């Protein structure tokens, strides 16, 4: 139960005294608290502690920003849940989700920061006095610095709660120390923090996906009247039969679908096609570019199903595509498709047992 999740006991986990002081400092609410730390630094444990301590003073929102080791929703999503001041906790088990479609922010910086901003706005609009934001453990290197600093710029937190062992966050924190805002609050890592192996992290993701899709049903979803996002097809006009035949002949494989958008062709083929072959054929056919996707890469592709406001209703797994009728065969934990107005395609393939499958490549 969530009540047990947020109410940490001293006999369960070591709570440093400085954590208690931070909770007292922000007890009056009206603060956005962003937690930073490397892998296995205890970021989620700190979030749990703060939520349990701050909720009595007013509604607290928990923004789960770790799409790889998610707490609230399935992996590949960001999540938002509310803890009312009376601790009745009615909607923690049905969090609002933002679909990233991947289990790492690498290569997905823009949706990551946009998702954080949208969920923070939703938390404030719903009346949350305090928002506690958990983040991924990606802190090493220039890309991590860029992501964290852009996220801070967009979210404008009141304080950065920093769990670090040996100065690993300093390259991120230096400008905020100089500017004086947001507050940089250094906190020790709890003695209870334990490292998780890559296998443990993978097993966590598999378990979360497996539990999520356990009660899924099969549906047929027409795409002709629905918004499609991040789809490499159903955006242009079909190639003329003669051009399609030339393309198939040059690729030496059968085509399931081929279309063109402003001189850029996208095709779905029965087999993967080497890059040099695609480049040479694009020149030969007078195309600006040619992307060819292996049909197998869409089997069990992770999808996000959206309502009329663009909010995630559920995740789904793509099973089959009827290109002629523009219909998707999917499995999803929804009773029907009546409220589905949009579909987002992710970059993961996952089977119903939760196992992540490989992609040949992206185009």
Image: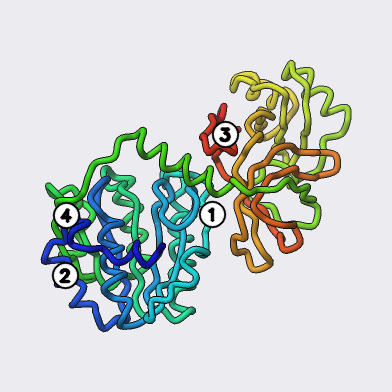
The residue tagged with tag 4: helix, strand or loop? loop
Distance from Cα at disc 2 to Cα at disc 3: 47 Å
User: Local crowd at mark 1 within 10 Å, few (<14), some, or many (≥20)?
Assistant: many
Q: Are marks 1 and 2 in contact (CB under 8 Å)?
A: no
The residue identified by callout 3 is 362
**The label number, if any, that marks residue 20 in the structure image:** 2
Q: Residue at x 42, y 51 (%)?
A: 70
Q: CA distance from mark 4 to mark 2?
A: 12 Å
- Where is residue 212 shown, x and y percent of the image? 55, 49
Viewport quadrant of the C terminus: top right
Specify the quadrant of the image occupied by residue 232: top right
Which colour assignment does the render follow? rainbow
Residue hosting label 4: 190
Q: Nearer the viewer, residue 131 or 227?
A: 131
> Which of labels 1 and 3 is toward the front?
1
Q: CA distance from mark 4 to mark 3?
A: 41 Å
Could you tell me which residue is drawn at 67 percent across and 35 percent down?
288
Label 4 or label 1, whichever lies nearer to me, is 4
Tell me the distance, in whole angstroms, between the alpha carbons under discs 1 and 3: 19 Å
Q: Position of residue 223 (x, y in %)?
A: 77, 51
Give the quarter of the image for residue 300. top right
User: Dot 1 lies on which element?
Assistant: strand
Question: Looking at the image, is mark 4 or mark 2 earlier in the sequence?
Answer: 2
């Amino acid at each position: 139960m969530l009540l047990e999740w947020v109410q940490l006991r001293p006999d369960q986990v070591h709570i440093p005294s400085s954590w208690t002081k931070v909770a007292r400092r922000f007890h009056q609410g009206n603060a956005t608290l962003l937690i930073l730390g490397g892998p296995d630094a205890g970021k989620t444990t700190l979030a749990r502690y703060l939520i349990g301590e701050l909720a009595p003073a007013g509604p607290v929102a928990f923004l789960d920003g770790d799409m790889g080791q998610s707490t609230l929703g399935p992996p590949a999503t960001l999540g938002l849940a509310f803890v009312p001041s009376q601790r009745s906790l009615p909607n923690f088990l049905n969090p609002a989700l933002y679909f990233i479609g991947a289990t790492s922010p690498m290569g997905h910086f823009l949706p990551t920061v946009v998702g954080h901003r949208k969920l923070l706005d939703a938390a404030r609009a719903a009346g949350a006095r305090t928002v506690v934001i958990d983040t991924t453990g990606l802190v090493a290197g220039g890309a991590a610095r860029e992501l964290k600093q852009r996220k801070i710029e967009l979210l404008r937190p009141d304080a950065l709660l920093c769990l670090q062992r040996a100065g690993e966050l300093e390259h991120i924190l230096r400008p905020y120390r100089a500017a004086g805002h947001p507050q940089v609050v250094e906190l020790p890592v709890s003695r209870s923090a334990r490292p998780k192996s890559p296998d443990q992290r993978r097993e966590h993701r598999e378990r979360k996906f497996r539990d999520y899709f356990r009660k899924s049903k099969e549906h047929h979803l027409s795409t002709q009247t629905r918004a499609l996002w991040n789809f490499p097809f159903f955006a242009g006009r079909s190639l003329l039969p003669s051009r399609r035949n030339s393309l198939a002949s040059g690729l030496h494989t059968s085509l399931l679908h081929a279309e063109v958008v402003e001189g850029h062709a996208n095709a779905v083929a029965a087999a993967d096609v080497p890059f040099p072959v695609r480049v040479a054929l694009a020149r030969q056919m007078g195309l600006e570019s040619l992307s060819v996707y292996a049909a197998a890469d869409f089997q069990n592709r992770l999808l996000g199903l959206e309502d009329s406001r663009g909010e995630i209703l559920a995740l789904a797994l793509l099973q089959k595509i009827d290109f002629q009728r523009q219909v998707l065969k999917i499995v999803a934990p929804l009773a029907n498709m009546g409220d589905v107005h949009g579909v987002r395609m992710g970059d993961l393939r996952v089977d119903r047992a939760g196992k992540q499958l490989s992609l040949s490549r992206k185009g």
